């Protein structure tokens, strides 16, 4: 089959970006650049390469995320290993990294709760020179995060801790910022998500009935670990701006909500209210 033929198969499976997905899969399987793939787009693929590409395209046809088939993905300009034990890094999450870079100084201490692949904490170690404690409930996710820290040269700047943030733990000092992209999808809509998301760990997505479960636990269990002027920097769901502001207010904090590049609420910076 030609790459054009594979593209048609993905289109029939309902995959919108069929051409870019086939290009990425072929570049991965053939070990060549996207530009070289484009040059071979009309050629018949044969032999071992055809068998490998067939296997990869079949997985994508079944709506497995491209990122899990390729096994790596870019976040903030760096290549991360990804596996079904952690969420695939999303471009929206780069917003939290940018916020951190604009306000943190070399040597500052931060935490990254529910760290998954480690992308937030690792990107901040690399690009802001901070020291990070990263926490996740999943030992498998932490294995991926440790591997990423090593591959990206920051293993000496980040420590990983296996703790459940609904219980607390995994942190040991005061932090200038505590980042978290916790599970925040409302349990009731988990079944209505795109088929690709069913391959991602529900543990990393399901935020309880109102999607707020983990923010509540984090504010309750980790507030004492913020510097006097420290901040929680949360990724939130597009419809959770008002809810996070209420949860913060009820605990003596206030939230400033920022929109992402789709003009949807995506980040909440939560700080202590100053006393009158
Ligand atoms: N951004 C993810 C999504 O929309 C959710 C991430 C999360 O729950 N932390 O699928």
Image: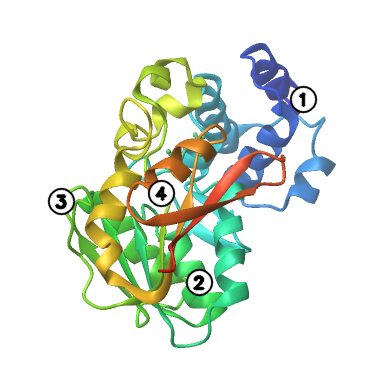
Front label number (1 vs 3): 3
Q: Nearer the viewer, residue 136 or 62?
A: 136
Q: Is residue 271 left or right of residue 136?
A: right
Front label number (3 vs 4): 4
User: Which badge, 1 or 4, is on the more N-terminal residue?
Assistant: 1
Front label number (3 vs 2): 3
Seen in the picture, residue 75 relative to 263 is either above or below; the reply is below
Looking at the rendered structure, the secondary structure element under dot 1 is: helix
Q: Residue 221: x, y in percent?
A: 22, 57
Which residue corresponds to the image point at 43% horizontal and 69% vertical from the top-left?
A: 276
Q: Is residue 228 left or right of residue 167?
A: right
Looking at the rendered structure, the secondary structure element under dot 2 is: helix
Q: Are marks 1 and 2 in contact (CB under 8 Å)?
A: no
The residue labelled by disc 3 is 167
Q: Residue 29: x, y in percent?
A: 58, 43
Seen in the picture, residue 71 relative to 201 is either above or below; the reply is below
The residue labelled by disc 4 is 249
Looking at the rendered structure, the secondary structure element under dot 3 is: loop
Q: Are marks 3 and 4 in contact (CB under 8 Å)?
A: no
| Labelled disc at residue 181 | none
Which residue corresponds to the image point at 52% horizontal and 44% vertical from the top-left?
A: 70
The residue labelled by disc 2 is 124
Q: Residues within 10 Å of mark 2 (few under 14, many from 20)?
A: many
Q: Is mark 4 within 8 Å of ligand 1?
A: no
Q: Residue 172: x, y in percent?
A: 21, 75
Q: Nearer the viewer, residue 132 or 145?
A: 132
User: Which badge, 2 or 4, is on the more N-terminal residue?
Assistant: 2
User: Which badge, 3 or 4, is on the more N-terminal residue?
Assistant: 3
């Amino acid at each position: 089959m030609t790459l054009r033929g594979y593209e048609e198969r993905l289109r029939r499976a309902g995959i919108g970006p069929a051409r870019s997905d086939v290009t990425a899969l072929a570049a991965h399987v053939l070990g060549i650049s996207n530009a070289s793939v484009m040059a071979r787009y009309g050629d018949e693929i044969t032999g071992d390469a055809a068998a490998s590409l067939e296997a990869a395209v079949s997985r994508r046809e079944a709506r497995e995320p491209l990122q899990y088939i390729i096994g790596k993905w870019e976040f903030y300009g760096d290549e991360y290993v990804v596996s079904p034990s952690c969420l695939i890094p999303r471009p929206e999450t780069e917003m939290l990294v940018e916020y951190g870079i604009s306000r943190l100084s070399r040597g500052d201490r931060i935490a990254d709760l529910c760290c998954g692949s480690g992308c937030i904490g690792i990107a901040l170690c690399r690009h802001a020179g901070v020291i990070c404690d990263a926490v996740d409930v999943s030992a498998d996710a932490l294995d991926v995060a440790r591997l990423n820290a090593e591959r990206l040269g920051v293993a000496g700047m980040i420590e990983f801790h296996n703790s459940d943030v609904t219980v607390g733990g995994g942190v040991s000092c005061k932090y200038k910022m505590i980042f978290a992209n916790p599970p925040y999808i409302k349990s009731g809509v988990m079944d209505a998500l795109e088929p690709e998301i069913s391959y991602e760990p529900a543990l990393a997505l399901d935020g309880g009935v109102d999607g707020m479960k983990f923010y509540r636990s984090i504010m309750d269990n980790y507030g004492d670990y913020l510097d006097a002027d420290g901040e929680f920097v949360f990724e939130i769901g597009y419809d959770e701006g008002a809810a996070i502001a209420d949860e913060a207010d009820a605990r003596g904090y206030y939230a400033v909500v920022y929109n992402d590049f789709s003009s949807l609420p995506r980040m909440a910076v939560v700080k202590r209210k100053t006393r009158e």
